[in-house]
Image (cartoon, helix red, strand yellow):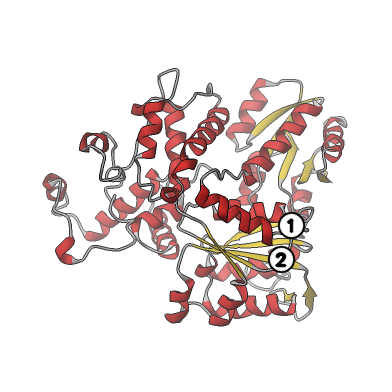
Amino acid sequence: MRLMIIGHLDGHISQAGKIAIGRGAKVIHCEDTDQAIGALLNGKGADLVMMDVKQKIGQFIERLEQERIHIPIVACGIDADARAAVKAIQQGAKEYVPLPPDPELIAAVIEAVTEENSTMIADDPAMKKVVELANKIAPSEATVLITGESGTGKEVMSRHIHAKSKRKDGPFIAVNCAAIPENLLESELFGHEKGAFTGASARRIGKFEESHKGTLLLDEVSEMHPLLQAKFLRAIQEKEITRVGSNEPVKVDVRILATSNRNLEQSVQKGEFREDLYFRLNVVNIPLPSLRERPSDIARLSQFFADKYAEANGVPKKKVSAEALKKLQSCEWRGNIRELENTMHRAILISAEDEIEADAIFIQSGALTSGQPAAASASSPDPAGVSGAGKEEPATPSEKPAVQNPGAVENMIGRTIADVERDMILNTLDHCLGNRTHAANILGISIRTLRNKLNQYKDDGAKIPSSESN
């Protein structure tokens, strides 16, 4: 755990840092947000930021988003100032901690962040085998390729491997190759020097250097541009990188983990992914089963997410009722664990009973297994109108289903294809609570295509649904 503390608060916040050090955290202290941004850009990474509530929290979070740095923020203030706490939460802070600090409260905050990032639920036999394999190879230095459908928990597995490795006390840095524009990914990975390109107003340390002596996760590595793949391969083989705008090589000691929801062998055959890089990454392959292949885990996962979002939203925790669980277990879960998480987030917010009732479980139309009664799926709305788009095998022309709602088709008459496509994409993204990877999976398009479409809609003035995790 790496903790960054911003501000002073009469020494109380430094006292919180000492408590955190006693709990095993590595702490860095910054005078203000400008110094904090500078430290982060120069490789002083953090897993959690605790900052004086009087600091400009909103501006700091905006700057983090601009620099593509994702860190949870906890605001701290002397005494229990309700107005300051509410303002801090509204500006984007995850939590408010009153000072002087309570050792147990500081420990709970640190534990919560750690648990949220690495909780592994694996009771089902199919998942137990995978975890056993992960535990065997975790202490090694082998490069690992984690594969599986979107939403199966590949990043959670990556963090689990890091926590079980010899590098567990080092940093764990994750880079989502699908979420970062192609022209910025090189700088994100290797860093850049001041003036290297337009907008490079200061030197920035890349993720390779930031993860020195630790683990670097390349999430959705299949989305990396082929030209960058060559430079990435060289960095792995030579154990050194060169910042953009520099000729000086920098030695790095990093263990590489990578994930993909695509069949990389097929990508190699199509010329979309380098064969030598594929073999370099695929030293050990850990294939994650889909949620429908590990049904025994649905009960625990459902309760875990219900408790998580009850706490996050300040509502009472509730047990998942037997009827609700039966409904959950009847679902196909094309979106896997991520779809289940979103479903339970909605359920805990709208539940009106002492236990989470079946009526609070809204499942996408058509997502129930064929053995379930039609009435069960009819009660679950499909706001995106694309319930069949996430199928792995598209239907042939003779297999296309009949139109179930002719009126919906009639309402499209007179509209352009571009308008219909825009509404379908935005509605699907809204249904997925802003999760772009999940939305792209449902729509059957690449994350890159989705990102380009959203940028176009944003330029046209459309409101883009944002992820609640950001």
Instruction: Say whether residue 346 is left or right of residue 44.
Output: left
Image quadrant holding the C terminus, namely top right
The correct choice, above or below, for 101 with respect to 249 in the image is above
Mark 2 surroundings: few (<14), some (14-19) or many (≥20) residues within 10 A: many
Q: Which residue is mark 2?
A: 255
Q: Secondary structure at mark 1?
A: loop
Instruction: Say whether residue 215 is left or right of residue 148.
Output: right
Q: Position of residue 275 (x, y in %)?
A: 53, 81
Evaluate whether residue 68 shows in this view: no
The amino acid pointed to by label 2 is: Arg
The amino acid pointed to by label 1 is: Ser
Q: Position of residue 168 (x, y in %)?
A: 76, 54
The correct choice, above or below, for 99 with respect to 394 in the image is above
Q: Earlier in the sequence, mark 1 or mark 2?
A: 1
Residue farthest to the top? Answer: 354
Verify CB contact (< 8 Å) between mark 1 and mark 2: yes
Q: Nearer the viewer, mark 1 or mark 2?
A: 1
Q: Secondary structure at mark 2?
A: strand
Residue at 75%, 56% in the rendered image: 171
- Say which of 433 and 272 sits in front: 272
Label total for image: 2
Q: Which residue is mark 1?
A: 165
Residue at 53%, 21% in the rendered image: 316
Q: Quadrant of residue 373?
A: top left
Q: Position of residue 78 (x, y in %)?
A: 78, 24
Residue at 48%, 55% in the rendered image: 289
